[in-house]
Amino acid sequence: MPEIRIPFFKPSIDAADVEAVTESLRSGWLTSGPNVKELERELAAYCGAGFVNAVNSCTAAMHLALRAWDIGPGDEVITTPYTFAATATVVIHTGATPVLVDVRDSDANIDPELIERAITPRTKVIIPVDFAGEPCQMDAIMDIARRHRLKVLSDAAHSVGSNYRDRPVGSIADATAFSFYATKNMTTGEGGALATNDEALSDRVRVLTLHGITRDGWNRYAAGGTWKYDIAEFGFKDNLTDLAAALGRKQLARLDHFNEQRAHVVQRYFANLRDEEHLTLPGFDEANHRAWHLFVVRVKNGQSPVHRDQVIEQLADRGIQTSVHFIPLHYFTAYEKTGRWKRGDFPVAERIFDGAISLPLFPDMTDEQVDEVCGALREILHP
Ligand SMILES: *Cc1c(COP(=O)(O)O)cnc(C)c1O
């Protein structure tokens, strides 16, 4: 393997991040405590939500929201195949059935018209995914949901810091799940959060997050706490540690800066690749002020002399790491085995996948690195 000259991703961790985690370690309070409470408060203020529950992943946040809405066997939940597996797997774990609909060619986000056609009397929830950071068509989606009395759970793993029109992601859907996984726009190593304006939802998620205990550990062990607690229902173990939250608070404070740095990289990619005839560049809506989690170009396999797979290989030979987002869900063995979907069912998602390459994108990426990636791409596409 050639040495990695340009990684696909590099987290931005500075001395203040290290100091905050160290301080948390020294405080003696390691599990969910004061930093979790503060992160929840700060993130709620940041994204314009009434309530935030910090948890240990975006996957957990989505699963807990579905559980708190009593989604289960017999229910249907609409999402797309063009997402990370967690989005649909959490639906399966509730006992409900994921109903997949195709995406829009322009931005790989769910097509509102196809949502409407997929609704049955069993439909309970829609999970739009803000692919690469571009917000979904939330006005249309919320309108469909209201007319059919459905809940909207936004998978905003890519879009923390994005605005849809002039509203922050987190303030629009009935519930919004964020990811603080290592490669996401802000990180706690592993972590996530659920944002909502529904206090009852947030309260129930809090109970389900920690074993169904109605009085959380923070209260139990804090001054004046008692040993008494009740298990109100069968819960999970999805709480975020205070160590992680200490990092999360520092990261959140720099999130807008990270997203500006990402946008700078993306602008340079656009300027550099605008005239590249063998690539389709990502579409986006100028009316949104969006975060860029991924920069996904599409090789026009039919007309390009080099297929997407070879482009990825040749970039790797030059030490340029890339990725592919996403392998459509119905291509995976576990999904295929359900017998619900077959290849060809989602022509747009499949076509996007065939050409997709996620180029390196991280806040500290230099102009020279962007230029090197673009130069390499051009050479490879014109052998
Ligand atoms: C990363 C990701 C998730 C899962 O996030 P975790 O915090 O790792 O659970 C969910 N959906 C999408 C679209 C993702 O990219």
Image (cartoon, rainbow, N blue to C red):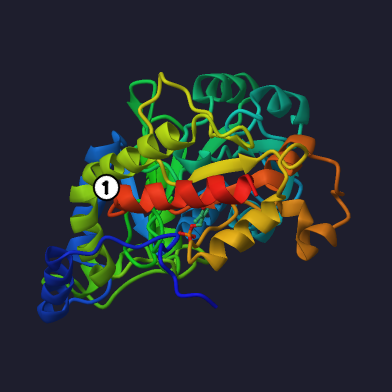
In the image, residue 188 above or below residue 138: below
Classify residue 171 by image quadrant.
top left
Query: As drawn, is 90 to the left or to the right of 139?
Result: right
Measuring 53% from the left and 41% from the top, which residue is drawn there? 131
Q: Which residue is mark 1?
A: 258
Classify residue 24 by image quadrant.
bottom left
Q: Is mark 1 within 8 Å of ligand 1?
A: no
Q: Where residue 79 appears, x then y in whole percent?
A: 65, 41
Measuring 40% from the left and 42% from the top, which residue is drawn there? 200
Q: Where residue 70 appears, x then y in whole percent?
A: 59, 48
Q: Amino acid at mark 1?
A: Phe
Q: Where residue 34 appears, x then y in whole percent?
A: 17, 63
Query: As drawn, is 330 to the left or to the right of 290?
Result: right
Residue 361 appears in the rendering: no
- 347 or 333: which is nearer to us? 347
In the image, residue 14 above or below residue 261: below
